[in-house]
Image (spheres, helix red, strand yellow):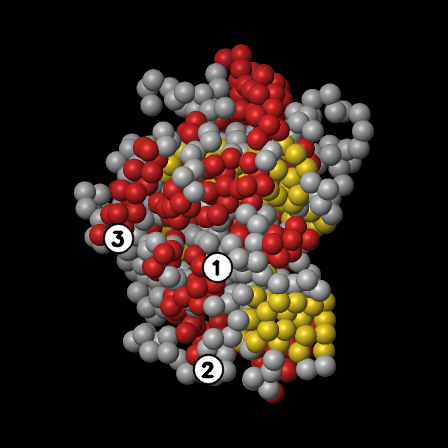
Amino acid sequence: MTGSAGRGETVGRPRSLFDKLWSSHVVVERPSGDALLWIDRHFVHEGSFHAFNQLQARSGTVAEPGLTFGVADHYVPTRNRDRAEQPEIARMIDDLGSNTARHGIELFGMHDARQGIVHVVGPEQGLTLPGLTMVCGDSHTSTHGAFGAYAFGIGASEVAHVLMTQTLWQKKPKTMRIRIDGTPIAGVGAKDFILSIIARIGADGARGHAVEYAGAAVQALPMAGRMTMCNMSIEAGARCGLIAPDETTFRWIEGRPFVPKGDVFARAVEDWRRLPSDEDAAFDREISLDAARIAPVVTWGTSPEDALPIDGHVPDPARETDEGRAATLRDALDYMGLRAGQKLSDIAIDRVFIGSCTNARIEDLRAAASVLSGRKAKVPGLVSPGSSLVKRQAEEEGLDRIFTEAGLDWVEAGCSMCVGMNGDTVPAGERCASTTNRNFRGRQGPGARTHLMSPAMVAAAAVAGRLADVRPMLEGRS
Amino acid sequence: MKPLTRIAGQACPLGLANVDTDQLIPARFMKRPRSEGYGSFLMHDLRRDEAGAERPEFPLNREPWRSAPILVARRNFGSGSSREAAVYALADHGFDVVIAPTFGDIFASNAVKNGVLPAVLGEDEVEDLLAALAGTPDLAVTVDLGAQTVSWGNRCVAFAIDPVWREQLLNGWDDIDVTRSFAGEILRYRTATETERPWMRPAGPSPDR
């Protein structure tokens, strides 16, 4: 029941990466198929106060403070860290501090040099490792699957359950493999891959599934791109996203602060090499895409599935045969202030945002800076790095100057204008080209209109003042 | 948590697809403790205009649905953010049941933990129910969790729910008590893993952090 990943299990049915992660974490299983899973890492943030309140109501204690980490990200101000504008926000940041202190949980607080967005900080600190189960009260916990971990978002009651027991009841999801083979065109990357997938299968297309991304184009991605893909698995409705750990993974994590060292690390790597799906492992569903056929993608509507290549046009509800679908389209066009049939590249924008757990790693900032370098943005915008360490590195590389010389604001790390909880919002009716993960109504603020795209595409939109194809702007640049 | 067995009353035809949890409760309302009640924030920005006045055409603002215990929506209800506050808003407003063809996974789990039933009906059946409600707004709808059926007029259709969730809702059970009964197994797992896979625990941070 507690067999370790892969060890001594070469004989028998071929297993997928997910099967291995699952079976190595089952504490007990009910006849119904529900399993009590051991949780290796649990992250809490300011929003976790609901769960700490539940814990307190039951006079509970934290079972494994050493496996629990606090990160201030959702509500932290990105300007003027000395005072939060609203007392309610200041209270939430303080509450995270007192809750973690009371229970002996390590905190990466607002003033910690390692602070940042939880899904950037976890990997950066080496808290994210292959073979782990990881949870957080945040749907984008799926990000950590990029390392070959089973990582998923949970609600406040589940956060309280994990705090008190270090376990969680789960029903084993179905498995799905999405292969991307072929070589992508220059200027096309992980964000275009994942938006293309969601456009194809729908925002609930992977519901109830653990999705493994595989194929040559996925294996060729650096860790940052892998995290971007796994991050948005939730936007396809998936329970989690996974990528098999390989040499790229091991090189990336070795030597990070919380990663085991020396002989223990060597033994870990030996174990992790057995994690990838067996050759003949069966999946409940498989789909495949050709990377060479993927163009830079933008969203036009209010669901991540409303994504199209930048050379496309806004869809026309009149051409829909299904009345329900036509009504949804009309509604989305109305909210977004767009005309049916309009060219995507004719859509003027009011501002840009570069940040979020999807796209605020150093690689993302470099991609945006490579487009913005020596150019001016036609619209205002905010650049918020994924963590304080990313911020420091970007400044060492001079990226901050590229952003500010282009006319964008360079601010502190946090969830910022992705979720609009800290006061960074898009004003009602304004249109924002954004590296974030959700174009939901009001996501970036009441009445805000969000277009999702890659960091390079956001940079291109900033330079053009409208949605634009980044490819011509990359000519002659590295 | 109070047990939930049979809910009878009005059903509010929301009729929207992809209602994400940002719609169910916008982020700016999540700073307050649950004890203050979240009902008035439910679908705030869909329900109200920029000035804060109710939009009269929105189903939630119309009689006889203002206090309906059942909500009917199209596919992918509760997608997006894991915020349990979305369920707090539904429960505090007075909804015991949400009927839809598909639900966001995290939302469905959050719903059950707060005594709200996510009842899965086929897409065609949801369309039939929405059409029936369009014709007869005060149509009486009954959701019977024991029998696992939704009935209205002369229709009675079975809905899907995970059997463990069904049992939990019927009995008003709480996970944590159940889990604590497995304390021995949890300890055995922990001890075995520590020996077999010592790298699973975080190492201390480097001195130069």
Q: Which percent across, then down, holds residue A22?
A: 65, 36
Is A389 located above or below residue B139 in the figure? Answer: above
Residue A114 lies, in percent from the top left, at 33, 32
Name the residue rendered at 55%, 41% in the picture: B177
Secondary structure state at the residue bearing disc 1? helix
Q: Alpha-carbon distance for marks 3 and 1?
A: 22 Å
Marks 3 and 2 on same chain: no
State the residue in front, A69 or A428: A69
- Residue annotated with mark 1: B87
Whether residue B93 is visible to the viewer of this picture, yes or no, is yes
State the mark number for residue A88.
Answer: 3
Secondary element type, mark 2: loop
Query: A125 and A254: which one is in front?
Result: A125
Q: Chain of mark 1?
A: B
Of all chains, the one bearing label 3 is A
Q: Earlier in the sequence, mark 2 or mark 1?
A: 2
